[in-house]
Amino acid sequence: MPELYIGLMSGTSMDGIDAALVEISDSKTHLLATHQHPVPASLNKTLHQLALNKHNIDLDMLGSCDAELGELFAEASLQLLEKNHFKPSQIKAIGSHGQTIRHQPNTQHPFSMQIGDANRIAYKTGITTICDFRRMDIAAGGQGAPLVPAFHQAAFSSAIENRAILNIGGIANFSYLPKDKNNPILGFDCGPGNTLMDAWIKKIKNKAFDKDGQWAASSKPHAELLEKLLQDDFIHRPPPKSTGREYYHLDWLQQMNTFSNISHAQIQATLCAFTAHSIQYAAEHFLPPIDTLIVCGGGAHNQHLMQNLEKQLNNINIQNSDKFGIAADWVEAAAFAWLAHQTLHLRTGNLAEASGASKAVILGATYFSH
């Protein structure tokens, strides 16, 4: 019997909450409705301070943001339902990714921290809420990321061709879906997606992102800087691996950019090329042959980036996820609705071969409504 779930996702830009209403039956996922809920500028600023401040985090600030985000996630869920004429009682559960404040899978005591108080989501909406999906995978020896390959398998796999899903969010990540079910599914972060490009245009032009890649397209990449960026250790590290804005940020770029007389536009062009080349490197070095590459995430709208990828991966059929039933902007939110379904039915949600965990485990913490 079909069940309805809500998936909530807040990405690295921290400027909005993606809320997706999903119908799930027999492991098939159908996206019914979507809603993007804004994050107030003041909260966005505080979240950036928490995410980028390596030391001396204010615990009062952290706790207050956790509470405020919980209220906001609840509001996003209720508005999604109201504008699409659904009632909370019709929803089986909410799967909330939360807002990542820190992702450190390679330290002595690995951890990943997402905030957005699920107690408040469950109480305000009256809907059972599942959150904190990453830490059980880390407890099992995994990276806590990527978590979407299992959903990609359920939503996009094919018996007639080898497919890969490329999600270009703040970070770019791959899921490899072989047509032969005896072969392993692969998944890993391959490097920066939009995070460096977004951070640079925010710094220079105070814009949230480079629409269609127009600013990057206005100049040519700086060859020496691009070569230096591509020597980055993470790009060459074999999977399993995951990363975040804790690693790729403007201070990192400043340390790498030791060249003078590079225009602002040329740096943007170089960052766009860096994303494309790191994706190409991952595809050529860490994945088996791909027949079709399905692209999702905000980067799928960056026309200049997509043109670069089509040139560099010219032997692969590249398609937008829209053509496979889930719009590019909503794949991740739909994935966390699906993960909530897995958890509520006591089914595993991670793929050990993707995250590096010792085994597949049931993910998340469940907060029942009252």
Image (cartoon, rainbow, N blue to C red):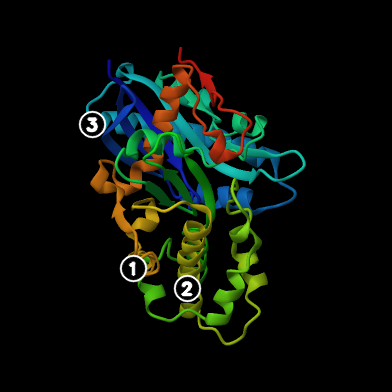
Provide the residue designation for mark 3: 84
Q: Nearer the viewer, residue 39 or 296?
A: 296
> So how many labels did they put on this image?
3
On residue 268, the disc is: 2
- Residue located 65% across and 61% down the image: 233
The disc label shown at residue 323, or none: none
Name which quarter of the figure residue 234 lies in: bottom right
Circle nearer the viewer, 1 or 3: 1
Nearest the viewer among 349 and 301 is: 349
State the residue position of label 1: 307
Dot 2, how many residues are within 10 Å of its Cα: few (below 14), some (14-19), or many (20+)? many
For label 3, count other residues whose C-alpha is less than 10 Å away and answer few (under 14), some (14-19) or many (20+).
Answer: some
Left or right of 129, for residue 63: right
The disc, 1 or 3, on the residue closer to the chain's N-terminal end is 3
Type of amino acid under label 1: Gln
Of labels 1 and 2, earlier in sequence is: 2
Secondary element under disc 2, as helix, strand or loop, is helix
Relative image position of residue 8 (x, y in whole percent): 42, 35
Residue 256 location, x and y as percent? Answer: 64, 72
Q: In what quadrant of the picture does the N terminus appear?
A: top left
**Regarding mark 3 in the picture, which secondary structure is present there?**
loop
Give yes or no for contact between labels 1 and 3 (Cβ–Cβ under 8 Å): no
Q: Amino acid at mark 2?
A: Gln
Q: Is residue 39 visible?
A: no
Relative to the observer, which residue lies in front, 312 or 85?
312
Q: Between marks 1 and 2, how big is the CA–CA gap? A: 16 Å
Q: Residue 307 at what x, y percent from top left?
A: 33, 68
Q: Are marks 1 and 2 in contact (CB under 8 Å)?
A: no
Q: Nearer the viewer, mark 1 or mark 2?
A: 1
